[in-house]
Amino acid sequence: MRIVGLTGGIASGKSTVSNLFKAHGIPVVDADVVARNILMEGTGGWKKVVAAFGEDILLDNGEVDRAKLGQIVFSDLEKRQLLNRLLAPFISHGMLMEVLKLWIKGCSIIVLDVPLLFEAKIDKWTKPIVVIWVDPETQLQRLMTRDGSMEEEAKSRINAQMSLDLKRSKADIVIDNTSSLEALHEQFQEVLTQITKPLTWTEFLLSRNGAFLALFSTLVSVTIFKKSS
């Protein structure tokens, strides 16, 4: 099984690339979706976050006001680190369960879409790692346009994340999304070719079919050994 790591930064275009993978039939496990699920009212993650940040972060219906929580943590490093520590075990477990479901279905290639791929040390479980990169000026302008935010607020949110230049230095594959959507699609096609190349023997043995083959081979070997004893 090939587990591809996909990451980038805010307003870099990672979600666009993630959707392109889905459109080409490659399953994506989205950490943001998992995070939303573990913050649903009454869940373990919800209880941890409410206990740490208070009921002021809740909407009238009891759900976490993600926008308000985001404003709190983006402006305070210690609170951001606290939130990450609280949610990390729940997110890791949720993503593992999603990967297991896809493994059972027989999927041989899975993309993990994780904004904090490197920060959460999930990169050690993925190969290759795809980073969506844009230059700082483009990232800032796209974020301000997308959210209607002021420059200082946008800069604060960007600076709260690992820099895209550092992520790029850790990548196996880099998609430069500074230019047009057409250019992004062209690069994606090249990446798709790399991602869908035949599995290595190690990757195959980690797949469901590979595991069944290994089990069958073991049973045959044991049977032959018993007959020859």
Image (cartoon, helix red, strand yellow):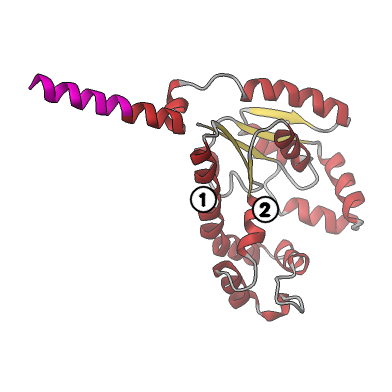
Rounded to the nearest angstrom, the CA distance separating label 2 from label 1 is: 15 Å
Does residue 74 belong to the magenta stretch? no
The quadrant where residue 108 appears: top right
- Residue 31, percent across and down? 63, 50
Q: Which residue is mark 1?
A: 97
Name the secondary structure under disc 2: helix
Residue range highlighted in magenta: 216-229
- Please tell me whether residue 47 is drawn above or below residue 121 in the rendered image: below
Q: Amino acid at mark 1?
A: Met
Q: Residue at x 34, y 27 (%)?
A: 214
User: Is residue 178 something one can see in this rendering?
Assistant: yes
- Please tell me whether residue 179 is drawn above or below residue 147 in the rendered image: above
Q: Residue at x 58, y 74 (%)?
A: 47
Crowdedness of circle 1 by 10 Å Cα count: few (<14), some, many (20+)? few
Q: Which residue is mark 2?
A: 32
User: Is residue 179 something one can see in this rendering?
Assistant: no
Name the secondary structure under disc 1: helix
Tell which tag, 2 or 1, sits nearer the viewer.
Answer: 1
- Residue 195, percent across and down? 62, 25
Q: Nearer the viewer, residue 127 or 160?
A: 127
Considering every residue shown, the one lying at the far left of the view is: 229
Q: Which quadrant holds the C terminus? A: top left
Crowdedness of circle 2 by 10 Å Cα count: few (<14), some, many (20+)? few
